[in-house]
Image (tube, grey):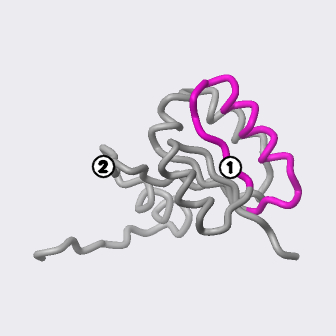
Amino acid sequence: MSYKIAVIGDPETVIGFSLAGVSHTHVYRDKNKALGQLEEFLNNREIGLILITHRVVESLGPEFHQVVGKKGLIPLVLKIPDKTGYSPEKDELSDLVRRSVGIEIPVKTEGE
């Protein structure tokens, strides 16, 4: 089965993905509308991946985790940086790998 991609984010991020062919999009302007759209994307069997910017996730607060916590394995929800980038306090990807695999995988940064 072929799955589609959905995007929730700022206008520039959504426009960029739309130009790349993503048809399921939502520009974040209101918390309640974004949560409703996220639930709609989660319940759409055509969608296999939901990309949502970190800043939108922060704006949605704990409600984001409540909504996503109810979903199954598909669609995968992936937080991405927006046009301004994103520097999380902790590396969420490394944390996810460590929890999934059970080991720490060292990542070299530029200049090391």
Q: What stretch is highlighted in magenta?
A: 24-48
Q: Is residue 91 toward the left or the right of residue 65 in the image?
A: left
- Spot occupied by residue 86 in the image (x, y as percentages of width and height): 34, 49
Amino acid on which the number 1 mark rests in the picture: Thr
Mark 1 residue element = strand
Q: Nearer the viewer, residue 49 or 88?
A: 49
Q: How far apart are marks 2 and 1 (CA)?
A: 24 Å
Q: Residues within 10 Å of mark 1 (few under 14, many from 20)?
A: many
- Spot occupied by residue 84 in the image (x, y as percentages of width and height): 33, 48
- Taking the magenta stretch, the answer to whether it contains residue 43 is yes
Residue 76: assigned label: none
Residue 25: assigned label: 1
Q: Is residue 72 toward the left or the right of residue 45 in the image?
A: left
Q: Where does the N terminus fall, quadrant-wise?
A: bottom right
Residue name at image x 49 percent, y 65 percent = 97
Q: Which of 13 and 107 is in front in this view?
A: 13
Asked where in the image residue 31 lies, by quadrant, the reply is top right
Q: Mark 2 points at which residue?
A: 87
Q: Is residue 76 toward the left or the right of residue 95 in the image?
A: right
Q: Which of marks 2 and 1 is in front?
A: 1
Q: Which of 71 and 41 is in front in this view?
A: 41
Q: Where does the C terminus fall, quadrant-wise?
A: bottom left
- Spot occupied by residue 70 in the image (x, y as percentages of width and height): 77, 40
Q: How many marks?
A: 2
Residue name at image x 53 percent, y 37 percent = 57
Residue name at image x 73 percent, y 58 percent = 23
Q: Please, which residue is most extreme toward the left here? A: 111
Residue name at image x 68 percent, y 49 percent = 25
Q: Residues within 10 Å of mark 2 (few under 14, many from 20)?
A: few
- Taking the magenta stretch, the answer to whether it contains residue 86 is no
Amino acid on which the number 2 mark rests in the picture: Ser
